Image: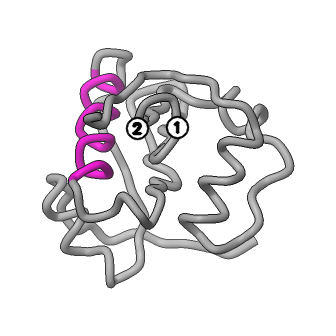
């Protein structure tokens, strides 16, 4: 069965948590509800009814949107799922008023984000 994508799905915390653990090898937030409440758009990738990918786009309420936590189950990586989720998120974010899509990433992901159309910028970051 091919992968299909949904805009603004609301999987339960158990499904999102299982994906988070697989994708990040870390414990997920206790609940995703407060995160998704601030979302401009989120995208889910599904194999049948099983959640295999997810990403969130937060907003400043204006023209800036922020791509957060693109996650793909390791068994499904290298199939273009994350790239398609980023594309769909960008289209939806623009339709909902965003004009800039920002992303922070580690150097080993530079090629992926360049392939998605992002270009490097200088920015600052403070760990709180």
Seen as rendered, the residue at the extreme bottom is 108
Q: Which residue is mark 1?
A: 50
Q: Which mark is residue 95?
A: none
Q: Is residue 101 above or below residue 42?
A: below
Q: Are marks 2 and 1 in contact (CB under 8 Å)?
A: yes
Q: Secondary structure at mark 1?
A: strand
Q: Which residue is painted at 45% across and 53% down in the image?
A: 70
Q: Is residue 84 magenta?
A: yes
Q: Which residue is painted at 71% across and 51% down in the image?
A: 17
Q: Secondary structure at mark 2?
A: strand
Nearest the viewer among 47 and 118 is 47
Q: Which residue is painted at 68% across and 53% down in the image?
A: 18
Q: Which residue is mark 2?
A: 47
Q: Which residues are magenta?
A: 80-94
Q: Position of residue 3 (x, y in %)?
A: 30, 37
| Quadrant of the image occupied by residue 114 | bottom left
Q: Position of residue 47 (x, y in %)?
A: 40, 37
Q: Is residue 26 above or below residue 67?
A: below
Q: Which residue is painted at 74% across and 40% down in the image?
A: 32
Badge 2: residue crowd in 10 Å (few <14, some 14–19, many ≥20): some
Nearest the viewer among 65 and 44 is 44
Viewed as shown, does residue 11 lie left or right of 42? right
Q: Position of residue 118 (x, y in %)?
A: 20, 56
Viewed as shown, does residue 124 lie left or right of 118? right
Query: Magenta span: helix, strand or loop, mainly?
Result: helix
Badge 1: residue crowd in 10 Å (few <14, some 14–19, many ≥20): few
């Amino acid at each position: 069965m091919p992968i299909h994508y949904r805009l603004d799905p609301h999987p339960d915390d158990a499904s999102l948590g299982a994906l988070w653990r697989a994708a990040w090898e870390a414990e997920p937030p206790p609940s995703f509800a407060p995160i998704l409440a601030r979302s401009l758009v989120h995208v889910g990738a599904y194999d049948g009814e099983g959640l295999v990918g997810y990403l969130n786009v937060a907003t400043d309420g204006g023209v800036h949107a922020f791509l957060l936590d693109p996650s793909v189950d390791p068994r499904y990586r290298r199939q273009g799922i994350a790239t398609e989720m980023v594309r769909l998120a960008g289209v939806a974010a623009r339709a909902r008023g965003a004009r800039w899509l920002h992303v922070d990433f580690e150097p080993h992901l530079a090629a992926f984000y360049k392939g998605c159309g992002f270009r490097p910028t200088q920015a600052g970051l403070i760990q709180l």
